[in-house]
Amino acid sequence: MLQTKRADFNGLAMRLGVSPVAVRIMRNRGLLDEREMRKYLYGTLDDLYDPRQMKGMETAAGIIEKKLIEGKKIRIIGDYDIDGVCSTYILLKGFHRAAGNGQIDYEIPDRIRDGYGINESIIRQAAEDGIDTLVTCDNGIAALKEISIAKQLGMTVVVTDHHEVPVDAYGQILPPADAVVDPKQDGETYPYHEICGAVVAWKLINVIYEDLGIPEHEWMELLEFAAIATVGDVMKLQDENRLIVKYGLKKIGSTKNTGLRMLVEKNNLDINNLSAYHIGFVIGPCLNAGGRLKSAKVALRMLLEQDPDRVSGLADELKELNDVRKDMTAKGETEAIEQVERFYMSDKVLVVFLPECHESLAGIIAGRLREHFHKPSFVLTRGEQSAKGSGRSIEAYHMYQGLCEVSDLLVKFGGHPMAAGLSIEESDIDEFRRRLNENAKLTEDDFVPQIWIDVPMPFEYVNEKIVDELKGLEPFGQGNEKPLFAQKSLTIRNVRVLGKNRNVVKMNLVTNTGHPFDGLLFADGDLFLEEQTGQNTIDMIYYPDVNEYNGTRTLQAIIKNYKFR
């Protein structure tokens, strides 16, 4: 579908020094006026918001500064995903710098044994260890009972989080901590609420450094970890987030962190030319792999370690864990698709039970099912006490509301419109599937994926200047998707299938005006050839790129979707 948002494209283009195509793309991404577009194009780190605007920030910083100066024992409680690991790293480095040789340590819950966030066991262990102050990061906002116990045991508690605040009939329910910093709480005065836990932690360190007279450039040395977490936690690359990621990616090239540098090298990436894609699909999964299959502490130890040999070993371990995770995911995805094709093709909401699947992979496989069938998808696995699982949804289906309607069947659940997690007795899975489908008000039209096109642009108009200009709109990702263009009625002159897995299709194409160019499609090559039989005219949705080979630069189209005519 073509996006048709209106604006003075030519006037804005002239004032901003870009093409009308770039203005149209920015307008399609929700930018409303020249001020927003100028910040998008030319914003710098000076445009970041003042962390003191965040509710509870100065209170939290004041408490921590006092404890650091007094030399009290502080324990940071993180989480097992990439945001939790980066948040914990930022606070650890920041507190140690502010305190000198302070008594600061950390704990990260085990995904299987502990589940998400701070729990009673972690709190009681902290009390036994003589901990004075607990500081949470990327968790804690929903831990009302647990933080009450910590207070009863005499500990000071500071919560830093970014998740939704629990509510009841009377409104939000905040945990009884000494300070709460979460941009989602009522009365928040911070201008942008969609930041990750690591950015909240990074902002807290900014205030502490300012108050204690530590130079700002030392705070900026933690920028890359706020950027990595923003991409890895799939935050919207808009507003402040986009600036953090844009400049954080550049900062990785000069990072002083041996572990991060080593992990990039182990994955054969150029550290000076990393994109959000590399973080989201290569580095991020490695940092997450420890928390999925072993312990998130592997990733954190790699980032903290100074000895090159030990760093190398930890980076190897993370890469190997991620390779195992990929194999396990592929196996689970195949089994899930086969199960749907055999038994559930007529279902509106897919519920698949994979008893042997590792529970940390359920969400990934549910996402793959959703992509494959474009239907809301749940994947359940066998847990110690009950089945556990995750769901991933489509725009037309409010997944959390769907679970609320069958909550009598569930042991535990939570989520939001597009994703959810749950526990359920195995004996109730069939009834869960039946009732979800009975309640779903979805139609066949809801199962047709929509692709939004920015501009219907013939390839004759594409040149290197446009390609370079599009690169200026990076980083692309959630909320700032890569621009897509469309062209109809192209003639296929030649097709070759490349790659050891035959998953790259290279086409020689020509427009109806006789303009030739190459197109690249990343898909099952043999399936494409089978579909193409007898058909040589194609419509395509594409992104323009430059192919560099032996010093020669040629324009090419990266084909995202196609239809034979």
Image: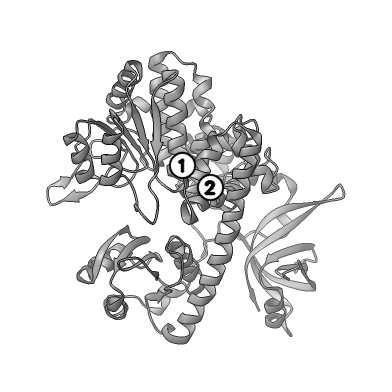
Q: Is residue 119 above or below residue 307?
A: below
Camera-nearest residue between 6 and 517: 517
Task: Please determine whether, in this image, residue 318 is positioned above or below residue 357.
Answer: above
Query: In screen coordinates, is 492 left or right of 314?
Result: right
> Looking at the picture, which amino acid does disc 2 mark?
Leu
Q: Residue furthest left?
A: 170
Q: Position of residue 361 (x, y in %)?
A: 47, 62
Could you tell me the amino acid type at mark 1?
Val
Q: SS for tag 1?
A: helix
Quadrant of the snapshot with the C terminus: bottom right
Answer yes or no: is residue 48 visible. no
Q: Is residue 537 visible?
A: yes
Q: Where does label 2 land, which residue? A: 287
Residue at label 1?
A: 85
| Residue 481 x %, y % | 53, 52
State the residue in front, 462 or 419. 419
Dot 2, crowdedness within 10 Å: few (<14), some or many (≥20)?
many
515 left or right of 446 in image: right
In the image shown, does 305 or 181 lie closer to the viewer?
305
Vertical comparison of 542 with 310: above or below: below
Query: What sort of colour scheme is used for the picture?
Result: one colour
Q: Looking at the image, do the residues carrying marks 2 and 1 touch, with CB atoms under 8 Å apart?
A: yes
Q: Is residue 240 left or right of residue 151?
A: right
For the residue labelled by badge 2, is the local secondary structure a helix, a strand or a loop?
helix
**Residue at the location (12% across, 47% down)?**
170
**Distance of mark 2 from mark 1, alpha carbons?**
8 Å
**Residue 331 placement, left or right of 378:** right
